[in-house]
Amino acid sequence: MVTQYKPIKVTPLSRFVGAEVSGVEIARGLSDQQFLELRQAFVKHSVIFIRNQNITPDEHIEFAKRWGEISVNRFFQAVDSHPVIAEVRKEAHQKLNIGSTWHTDHSYDQVPAMGSILYARVVPKLGGDTLFSSMYAAYEHLSDGMKNTLLRMRAEHSSRHAFGEAAYIGLDEVEGRLSNAAEATQDAVHPVIIKHPLSGKSALYVNGEFTVKFEGWSKEESQPLLDYLYSHAYKNEFTCRFKWTQGSLAIWDNRATQHCALNDYDGEQRLMHRITISGGCLEPSRS
């Protein structure tokens, strides 16, 4: 049953990225006009947050399908009853969390994910916030010389070092959270500067979690420039910070943002349900 139409309210959280949306009850359904407004907010702000949602896994899935085809994550533990939903879990006794370094999801795929829809089921009393950074702003604030250089470049991305068996050596905390290390065989090459398929804007597309090196460069040659781009991309002025509450939901654009989950809630549980939405091939920007 879809509620009677009423316009949503969009409140920006920072200058470049992020907005909270109110006037939406996902469990009751969204009208076509409400969903159009939600998509417009998503395109404009790159990540949108909706609080106070009480949804079942089935409702989470139905909502996700309105955004596109679901891409099932290979490495995260899935919800037993709903295998298209990945668990992002940290138990109270565990020290390491998932996603604590800046990254964008699935850049190691030939066709990277469009976005992710993350729903908070259990949150700590304090901490556990997520930071988001605008890759539009990161590109726009580069020098003209750097922009011209990067526009001609492509970078190699891989899942091997992040989710392969070597990544788990010495770690005893992946049990029940990450698996299928033998399937970490994905390699992809993408433009360093992409043209966003919806906004048409240019965005920086390298990340410290999955980018290996620039195409045609050695790792040793690539690392200094990559390190500079990472430090530039995560400047405070390009970011917003979201404090989770139970029932909050975030929808972010993997092509226009990167994110980082803070690990500052030692001794408490945090459980999120994530659905990833498939995307399309990334095109290089020309300007």
Image (spheres, helix red, strand yellow):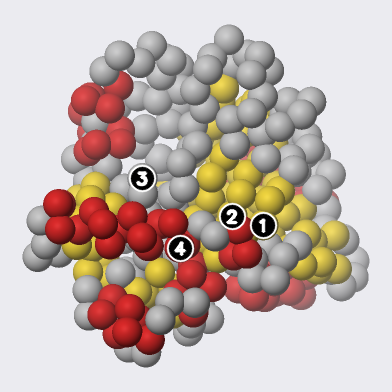
| Mark 3 element type | loop
Earlier residue among tags 3 and 4: 3
Q: Position of residue 133 (x, y in %)?
A: 56, 59
Mark 2–mark 1 contact, CB under 8 Å? yes
Q: Residue at x 66, y 14 (%)?
A: 267
Up-down relation of residue 131 to residue 151 (above or below): above
Of pointers 2 and 1, the one earlier in the residue sequence: 2
Q: Earlier in the sequence, mark 3 or mark 2?
A: 2
Residue nearest the viewer, comparing 28 with 79: 79
- In the image, is residue 78 above or below residue 241? above
Q: Residues within 10 Å of mark 4 (few under 14, many from 20)?
A: some
Which residue position is annotated with label 4?
Answer: 232
Q: CA distance from mark 4 to mark 1?
A: 15 Å
Instruction: Point out the tag, 4 or 1, that comes first from the N-terminus.
Output: 4
Q: Nearer the viewer, residue 86 or 254?
A: 254
Q: Which residue is mark 3?
A: 209
- The kind of residue on which mark 3 rests is Glu
Q: Which residue is mark 1?
A: 240
Can I make out residue 160 in this image? yes
